[in-house]
Image (spheres, grey):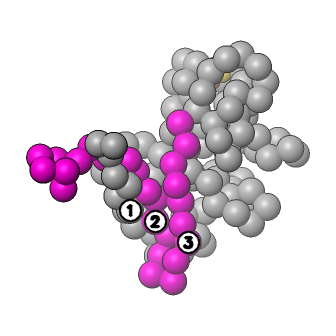
Amino acid sequence: MNEKIVWHKISESRHELFSDSQGLTEVAVNGREICISVINEKLYACAAKCPHAGGRMAEGYVDPLGNIVCPLHRYKFSVENGRNTSGEGYFLKTFLIEERKEGVFVGIEEKKGLFGL
Ligand code: FES
């Protein structure tokens, strides 16, 4: 395996992340744009852009079943595993996210350097 998970701190707390009650926001992590959502009190992280045609997921909404819905054409994705639950055959990249006492962290797979470090 040539990848390892690198954890990046994105905020001091979940309250700092969400300025409104929508429960969706966007952050930049190590050059990537990531959408953060809070659904039933749990945090999730996925790609900021929809795999269909680049809609900004943070401008969409979360449906009653807990799917994130793209604002452009309303395709739905599971925030747990990125599955395209409305059936168009796309896949939304998801990331690990953890809330720790030092803050909120997103885990990103990064290629190992020379010598596997
Ligand atoms: S761009 Fe997201 S559904 Fe089309």
Residue 39 picture quarter: bottom right
Q: Nearer the viewer, residue 43 or 71?
A: 43
Judging by the rendered image, the residue that carries numbered circle 2 is 105
**Residue ID at (63%, 36%):** 82
The earlier-in-sequence mark between 3 and 2 is 3
Residue 65 to residue 92: above or below: below
**Residue ID at (46%, 65%):** 105
Q: CA distance from mark 3 to mark 1?
A: 11 Å
| Amino acid type, callout 1 | Trp
| Amino acid type, callout 3 | Glu
Numbered badge on residue 7: 1
Percent x, y for residue 116?
19, 51
Percent x, y for residue 19?
60, 63
Q: CA distance from mark 3 to mark 2?
A: 6 Å
| Amino acid type, callout 2 | Phe
Magenta range is 93-117
Residue 49 to residue 73: above or below: below
The residue at label 1 has a CB less than 8 Å from ligand 1: no
**Residue ID at (46%, 59%):** 106
The earlier-in-sequence mark between 3 and 1 is 1
Residue 68 to residue 74: above or below: below
Numbered badge on residue 99: 3
Callout 1–callout 2 Cβ contact below 8 Å: yes
